[in-house]
Image: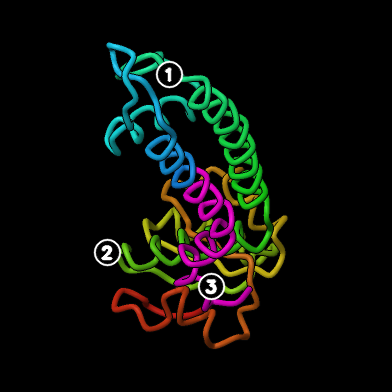
């Protein structure tokens, strides 16, 4: 796991969602522009143009399928045809964006980056003395249990994700931040709190 991704979670999400967001913006912009250009009718049946504010308001609730009605006046046939097209375009745009968001949330690299960010935040927020335990095998589990009984905090680095997931099942009194990573990497040790002022040692 690359510790640099700790700072890039937000930018990774923006990069993956860039195309869907641009698609939605373009659909909204074109829809609003079309409504302001296509001639409509006022209350007396005279030709009139819809202003930007009304066009923005109408597209905003139409694209979200709320659908209050035609404002400020009944639409002309040309406006209704344009709105019909805008409805289909907005549905496609939202479906594409939601699909991209779900794919992002299931992406392993993104989930690893989020996990790494949470771990780094937990380490930075440590205000009590702690030991950095490298490995959560039988010896590591005994060490964590002993430290927990003594009221001493611990942070675990274990290369096996399955062992890391067992931490919550062992009923420790205090929460133990853990990261599935290679403890032989200096960057990982630093991220895990090696240079933290509360770090008492590495085991």
**In the image: residue 130, left or right of residue 192:** left
Mark closest to the chain's N terminus, 3 or 1: 3
Mark closest to the chain's N terminus, 3 or 2: 3
- Please give the name of the residue rendered at 41% of the width and 31% of the height, measured from the top-left corner: 39
Range shown magenta: 1-27
Name the residue carrying label 1.
75
Name the residue carrying label 2.
127
Under tag 3, what secondary structure?
A: helix
Query: Which of these two is toward me, 200 or 120?
Result: 120
Name the residue carrying label 3.
5
**In the image: residue 127, left or right of residue 180:** left
> For residue 18: magenta?
yes
Which quadrant of the figure has residue 54?
Answer: top left
Q: Residues within 10 Å of mark 1 (few under 14, many from 20)?
A: some
Q: Residues within 10 Å of mark 3 (few under 14, many from 20)?
A: some
Which color mode does the image show? rainbow
């Amino acid at each position: 796991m690359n510790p640099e991704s700790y700072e890039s979670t937000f930018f990774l999400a923006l990069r993956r969602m860039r195309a869907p967001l641009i698609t939605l913006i373009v659909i909204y912009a074109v829809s609003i522009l079309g409504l302001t250009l296509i001639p409509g009718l006022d209350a007396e049946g005279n030709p009139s143009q819809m202003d930007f504010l009304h066009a923005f308001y109408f597209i905003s609730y139409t694209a979200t399928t709320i659908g209050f009605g035609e404002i400020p006046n009944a639409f002309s046939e040309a406006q209704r045809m344009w709105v019909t097209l805008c409805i289909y375009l907005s549905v496609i745009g939202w479906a594409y964006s939601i699909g991209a968001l779900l794919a992002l949330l299931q992406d392993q690299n993104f989930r690893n980056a989020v996990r790494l960010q949470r771990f780094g935040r937990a380490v930075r927020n440590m205000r009590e003395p702690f030991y950095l335990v490298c490995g959560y095998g039988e010896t590591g589990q005994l060490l964590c249990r002993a430290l927990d009984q003594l009221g001493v905090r611990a942070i675990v680095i274990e290369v096996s994700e399955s062992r890391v997931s067992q931490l919550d099942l062992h009923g420790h009194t205090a929460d133990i931040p853990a990261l599935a990573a290679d403890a032989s990497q200096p960057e990982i040790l630093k991220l895990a709190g090696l240079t933290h002022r509360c770090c008492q040692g590495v085991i």
